[in-house]
Image: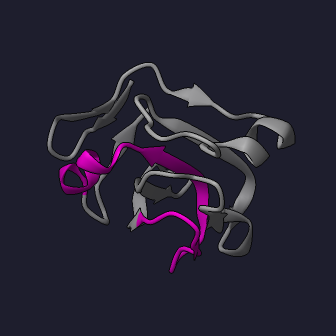
Amino acid sequence: MIINKSNGKLLGKNPKWLNNIFSQSIGAMFRTKISRGLIFPLKKEARASASIHMFFVFTPLTVLWVNSEKIVVDKGLAKPFRTYMPNEEAKYVIELPPEVYNKVEIGDYLDF
């Protein structure tokens, strides 16, 4: 589960960890809906390698950039066929359904 420990809200059940380059390159591509969270662990905290693209993703997504301490350092409501880069370095990129956007703020602590 992905839980916002700062406010106690559940952000996602049974998230899928995308641990390799193949699963990370596909991510949410070709989906019209995302029902569970996707967690992209990165090799190190960075901005550039935490950037995402929404090419061939046909639904908006809540995107959270989380540092190694599991604190949300940036968030966005990503729209199809655009690219995004966080304002701060991140160790994890978490993609969730768009309705989760208002359940989390920058600076919140997550547990996953």
Q: Percent from the top left, x then y, of residue 59?
A: 44, 51
> Farthest left residue?
7
Mark count: 0
Q: Is residue 79 magenta?
A: yes
> Farthest top residue?
14
Which of 43 and 97 lies nearest the eye of the viewer? 97
Q: Quadrant of residue 46?
A: bottom right
Residue 66 lies left or right of residue 10; in this view the side is right
> Farthest right residue?
21
Residue 85 lies left or right of residue 35; in this view the side is right
Q: How is the image coloured?
A: one colour
Residue 2 lies left or right of residue 105; in this view the side is right
Q: Quadrant of residue 52?
A: bottom right
Residue at point 66% right, 43% down?
A: 27
Query: In the rendered image, which quarter contains the N terminus?
Result: top left
Query: In the rendered image, which quarter contains the C terminus?
Result: top left
Residue at point 40% right, 29% down?
A: 35
Q: Percent from the top left, x then y, of residue 94?
A: 50, 47
Which of 67 and 58 lies nearest the eye of the viewer? 58
Q: Percent from the top left, x then y, of residue 31?
A: 55, 39
Residue at point 65% right, 68% down?
A: 51
Determine whether 107 is above or below 29 in the image: below
Determine whether 18 is above or below 80 in the image: above
Q: Is residue 91 magenta?
A: yes
Residue 3 lies left or right of residue 18; in this view the side is left
Residue at point 64% right, 46% down?
A: 29
Q: Which residues are magenta?
A: 78-104
Determine whether 29 is above or below 44 in the image: above
